[in-house]
Image (cartoon, rainbow, N blue to C red):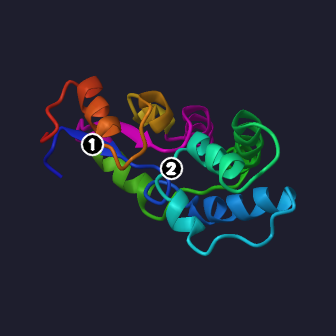
Amino acid sequence: MNKPFAIFDMDGTLIDSMPFWRDLSKDFLGSKGITVLPPDLGEVLKTMTMRDSAVYFTETLGVAGTPEQANEEMTAIMETHYRAHIPLKPGVRDYLEVLRRRGVRMCVASATPTPLADACLRRLAVRDWFEFLLSCDDVGAGKRSPAIFLEAARRLGAAPGD
């Protein structure tokens, strides 16, 4: 890589968290007594923030409580995994080390809430290699919008093409 900047997605790219995320909606909704899930649920939730998912669960699927309560409960489930179970993807540490030695400035742009991303990357001993972590929650838009990537480039002091 000959670029001076790198913006990394986290889930499924740096860390192998996708199985945990895939099970979150089933586990959360099951705890609320909803065992028959819409067949397209995974696709619907794919690029939503956790807050958006909480709104969807309460307003569309009828989960009792507020979106804030649903978000807190889902965050607690995932926090356990981020703090204790989710591993780096194979080869990631070596690749990041190569970029770091080359002086590439790196950050993370993720749909994962920043506190969860931070806890996981610290546990895996790679957090300090990234200048900052940016969540879709921080920019108020999911990853279908370019907002998170444009903000990451801005914070790095880079043009989007860089």
Quadrant where the C terminus lies?
Answer: top left
In the image, residue 19 lies in the stretch drawn in magenta:
no
Q: Position of residue 87 (x, y in %)?
A: 60, 57
Q: Which residue is disc 2 drawn over?
A: 48
Q: Which residues are magenta?
A: 100-126
Foreground mark, 2 or 1, reads: 2
Q: Nearer the viewer, residue 122 or 71?
A: 71
Task: Count residues near mark 1 (Cα–Cα under 10 Å), then give few for <14, some for 14-19, many for 20+.
Answer: some
Residue drawn at 49 percent across, 61 percent down? 89
**Where residue 2 appears, x then y in whole percent?**
13, 48
Based on the displayed image, in which of its 4 quarters is residue 94 positioned? bottom left
Eyeballing the image, is 140 above or below 101?
above
**Residue under the image location 59 percent in, 66 percent down:** 41
Q: Is residue 40 above or below residue 10?
A: below
Label 1 residue SS: strand
Q: Residues within 10 Å of mark 2 (few under 14, many from 20)?
A: some
Query: Which circle's residue, 2 or 1, is located before the other in the chain?
Result: 1
Among the 4 quarters of the image, the one containing residue 147: top left
Residue placed most toward the observer, 36 or 86? 36
Residue 124 appears in the picture as rendered: no
* Distance from Cα at disc 2 to Cα at disc 1: 23 Å
Residue kind at label 2, given as amino acid type = Met
Which residue was labeled with disc 1?
Answer: 6
103 relative to 162 in the view: left or right: right
The answer to whether residue 59 is left or right of residue 151 is right
